[in-house]
Image: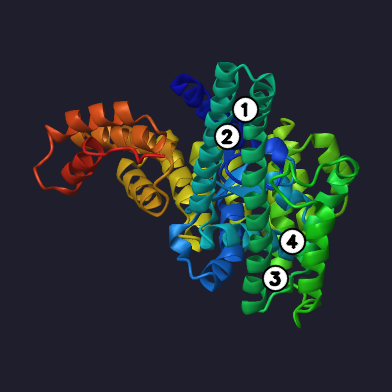
Amino acid sequence: MKGIARSTTHSLLAAVVALVPMLHALDANAQGRKLRLVRDAETEELIRDYARPILKAAGLNPGNIRIHLINDSRTNAFVIDGKRIFINTGTLISAKTPNEVIGILAHETGHIAGGHLVRLRQAVENAQTLAVIGMLLGAGAVAAGAAAGNGNAATIGGSIVTAAPGIAQRSFLNYARTEEIAADRAAIKYLNQTGQSAKGMLTTFQRFADQDLFADRYADPYVRSHPLPRERISQIERLAKSSPNFDKKDSASLQFRHDMVRAKLSGFTLRGDRVMRTYKGKDLPSVYAQAVAVYRLGSHKKALRMVDSLIKASPDYPYFWELKGQILLETGSADQAIAPLNKAVSMRPDEGLLRVMLGQALLSSKSNRNYQAAITNLSRGLQHDPDQAIGYRLLAQAYDQTGQRAKAEMATANGYFAQGDIGAAKAMATRAQSKLKRGSPEWLQAEDIISYKPPRI
């Protein structure tokens, strides 16, 4: 009897979690795929600017929420805990206006602010309990019927055993649908509080509805983790149109930045022929996309000429300088990459990715190598953006070249920690700590890693 209960609990947990991919996702097909995270300073800066007023309206500290970019062409965004939002490159590329992306971020913020992920785990536990109780009652009826020689009782008991997981599943999914509706309402509330339109959110969810239209014709509305699209669209449309901000447009400057990010992401993630078909013009976003695509196709000299034309047209745009530096660095011209990367950093001194790239150029340079400048830029870059494992590896290299072996080992430990290899991080931190002055900043960093205990999930 206990064995049945244990096995039922395990199988139900797997089934229920599978029905809520990544704990929450707009695209149910995201289930089971490995996330391919990508980093880009320009895109991340834009998304942070999109999210900041929404997070504040929700009573959240923007500094405590990380937004990660996934290299995936599908339109999707999701949260997996109360601190991280994941958004696909396809979401940005397919969104014609900033407002469409802001609406998605507002929806995800609704899940975080509403504590839905905490209650989601409780719902999983409740579903397990319901299934176990059903299994116990059914097994009890089978045993009682068999003991009394009552075949009908045994049959009824067997039906209860079979139905229990389905009942639990439906109970859980009903909860999930309720939370989706709550997140929609919260999103529109945040948009109203920040004086923004919910039209973009409506447009995005209409796109989802079109994608799911055929499947929804035959879908059981009770076996879904999300409400049927027509129900959600109806609610979102009614609430969105009741707002005085419904026809409000995004600012021209924000639209320009959005168009530039769409162009850049398209250039880096889509097939070259598709990029050239989509971006045919001579406007800045088109040339931006073309330059990236040309570089990816192997014509880096032509790409550099196109980037130079962009810089001439808009010399105050830091990410044109970044792209020039990146192309030069990646094609073996680190000496020439230093100047444009310095220019980009001077315009965005707090962008950790830019400083790490500059540090790499300083380390890779043959005639202008400067280890101390590399250490300064890498250290400052990692202070602003501590999740860059490559930055720590470069910093370790710079420390090693200047004879600072203990600091090099500590940087290596931080790099292992950043990439999630906790065992290697602890081993290297222990090794470094033995050479460091007790109580120094590096010694304390080593102590933090050595004493670190992964959170229980």
Which is more foreground, mark 4 or mark 2? 2
Q: Position of residue 311 (x, y in %)?
A: 66, 57
Q: Are marks 1 and 2 in contact (CB under 8 Å)?
A: yes
270 relative to 280 in the view: left or right: left
Q: Of helix, strand and loop, which one carries label 2?
A: helix
Q: Quadrant of residue 137?
A: top right
Q: Work out whether mark 1 precedes mark 3 in sequence or the reverse, and give the earlier one.
A: 1
Which is more foreground, mark 1 or mark 3? 1
Q: Amino acid at mark 3?
A: Ser
| Residue wearing tag 4 | 100
Q: Is residue 5 above or below residue 359?
A: above
Instruction: Name the residue rendered at 38%, 36% in the picture.
Output: 394
Instruction: Name the residue rendered at 28%, 38% in the picture.
Output: 453
- Placement of the C terminus among the 4 image quadrants: top left
Q: Amino acid at mark 4?
A: Glu
Q: CA distance from mark 1 to mark 3?
A: 61 Å
The residue most toward the front is 148
Q: Amino acid at mark 2?
A: Gly
Q: Is residue 240 above or below residue 335?
A: below
| Residue wearing tag 1 | 161
Q: Work out whether mark 4 precedes mark 2 in sequence or the reverse, and give the earlier one.
A: 4
Q: Position of residue 77 (x, y in %)?
A: 65, 49
Q: Work out whether mark 3 precedes mark 4 in sequence or the reverse, and give the earlier one.
A: 4
| Residue wearing tag 2 | 134
